[in-house]
Amino acid sequence: MSNTHPIGLFDSGIGGTSIWKEIHQLLPNENTIYLADSKNAPYGKKTKEEIINLCFKNVDFLLGQKCKLIVVACNTATTNAIKELRAKYDIPFIGIEPAIKPAANLSETQTIGILATKGTLNSELFNRQVENYSNIKILEQVGYGLVELIENGKIESEEMKNLLKLYLRPMITANIDYLVLGCSHYPYLIPQIKKILPEHIKIIDSGQAVAKQTKSILEKNNLINLSSENSKTIFYTNSDATVLKNILGFTENVFEKDF
């Protein structure tokens, strides 16, 4: 495996680009390939078996592009399939899980909120994680409809505002002081969420932690790209690329491809 080979990332759609941005910022020399499986979004509504099979398909594609490490830039995919991925493939995987630990450790009200997909909140991995914090009151909320609106470019729509108010107001009433975003799509909602939450409630997502872990694993496996050439990134989506281009803020190297 060459250290100039790309890092591969995949998600059930465009949300994992929030993870890509953190990795690209921390590791600007690394080549990357991003796979948006928007045709099958959201994963949160699918069965564990369906999620695992979709993950296998995505990984096979990225391995075909000679990726040296794969970031599962999707909470639902990680919590349902990371064990099976690591068992099947001989390549380093980085997963993404809701950042319960820092929220629970920092909470002064001993009450935190988690906004995530049904697939994440119902997963065995997530529930094992929650069991470690029995002294903390954890309010779980499925973000019904949020991923679909993001995938359709409706981040600032009235429908989005109304859904966020519906999901967040009970958490505010319950006196949370940290809100954990348990889906890689949700960081794109932070400006909207901040308009609803009181200023003292802090928002935590997993992006920076995933980027740091990616760097650590690359160093551990001697896979850091030391080339002086400019890095290259390619984005693939199996749906209309318009929303992906808008989220990224550029159009070059963004391709529609059936996979």
Image (cartoon, rainbow, N blue to C red):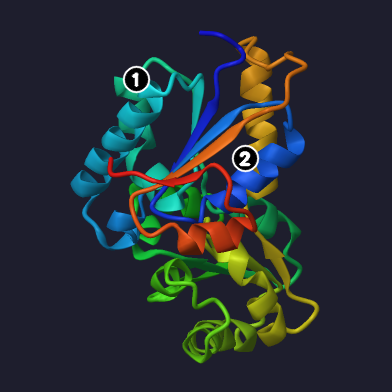
The residue lying at 34 percent from left, 44 percent from top is 257
Q: Secondary structure at mark 1?
A: loop
Q: Which mark is residue 89?
A: 1
Q: Amino acid at mark 2?
A: Val
Please tell me how crowded label 1 is: few (under 14), some (14-19), or many (20+) other residues with Cα within 10 Å.
few
Note whether residue 1 is visible.
yes
What residue occupies the far front of the structure in this picture? Answer: 252
The reply to whether dot 1 and dot 2 touch (C-beta < 8 Å) is no
Q: Nearer the viewer, residue 189 or 116?
A: 189
Q: Amino acid at mark 1?
A: Tyr
Q: Secondary structure at mark 2?
A: helix
* Image coords of residue 141 (percent x, y): 46, 73
Which residue, given by chain and number where applicable, does mark 2 sit on? 210
Q: Earlier in the sequence, mark 1 or mark 2?
A: 1
Q: Nearer the viewer, residue 76 or 226?
A: 226
* Image coords of residue 215 (percent x, y): 68, 27
Q: Quadrant of the C terminus?
A: top left
Q: Nearer the viewer, residue 57 or 214?
A: 57
* Image coords of residue 175 (percent x, y): 66, 82
Q: Quadrant of residue 197?
A: bottom right
* Image coords of residue 137 (percent x, y): 57, 69
Q: Which mark is residue 118?
A: none
Q: Is residue 43 above or below residue 210?
A: below
Q: Quadrant of residue 239?
A: bottom left
Q: Is residue 104 above or below residue 174?
A: above
Note whether residue 134 is visible.
no
The residue lying at 64 percent from left, 78 percent from top is 193
